[in-house]
Amino acid sequence: MALGLAPSLRAAQSVHLLGFVDKPCPGEPYCFELLVKPDFAAQVGARIRVRFDASTVIYDPENYQLTLEQHNIVAGSHLRLMIESTSNNQPGDYHSSFIWIGD
């Protein structure tokens, strides 16, 4: 599996994209592998790893804000995200600042 096939984002540059959760990252509760929708793949690649944390704003399909513990992001979830690369990320790894589930 190849992550980061497209050029990486520069640190602090945000990108909006859509995709489907392929699977959770092994051993990381707030991380998943995302299959990026083809219309957005040129920006970051077709498959990326996304991490999120207490600083991430998460919304459910009815636009109610969720806590980190309520997120319910699972394999197959359709997501709209704002992601950014950070200086300590590996190629193909991103942090999400906003996640809309089922959007």
Image (tube, grey):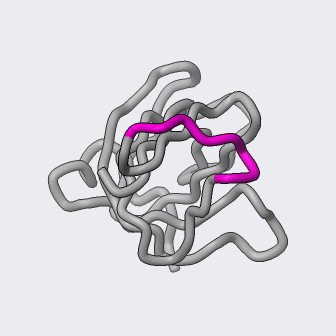
Q: Quadrant of residue 86?
A: top right
Query: 92 or 99: nearer the eye?
Result: 99
Q: Position of residue 62 (x, y in %)?
A: 37, 45
Q: Is residue 15 above or below residue 45?
A: above
Is-magenta flag for residue 68? yes
Q: Position of residue 55 (x, y in %)?
A: 71, 28
Question: Which span of residues is magenta-colored?
Answer: 63-70
Residue at the image point whose x is 48% and y is 38% from the top:
64
Q: Position of residue 72 (x, y in %)?
A: 60, 62
The residue at the far top in this view is 12
Query: 30 or 50: nearer the eye?
Result: 30
Residue at the image point whose x is 55% and y is 19% from the top:
12
Q: Position of residue 6 (x, y in %)?
A: 36, 51
The residue at the far right in this view is 27
Q: Is residue 34 left or right of residue 39?
A: right
Q: Is residue 36 above or below residue 16?
A: below
Q: Quadrant of residue 37?
A: bottom left
Is-magenta flag for residue 98? no
Q: Is residue 77 above or below residue 67?
A: below
Residue at the image point whose x is 56% and y is 77% from the top:
23
Q: Is residue 91 left or right of residue 88?
A: left
Q: Quadrant of residue 5?
A: bottom left
Residue at the image point whose x is 44% and y is 25% from the top:
14
The number of numbered badges drawn on the structure is: 0
Query: 7 or 21: nearer the eye?
Result: 21
Query: 54 or 50: nearer the eye?
Result: 54
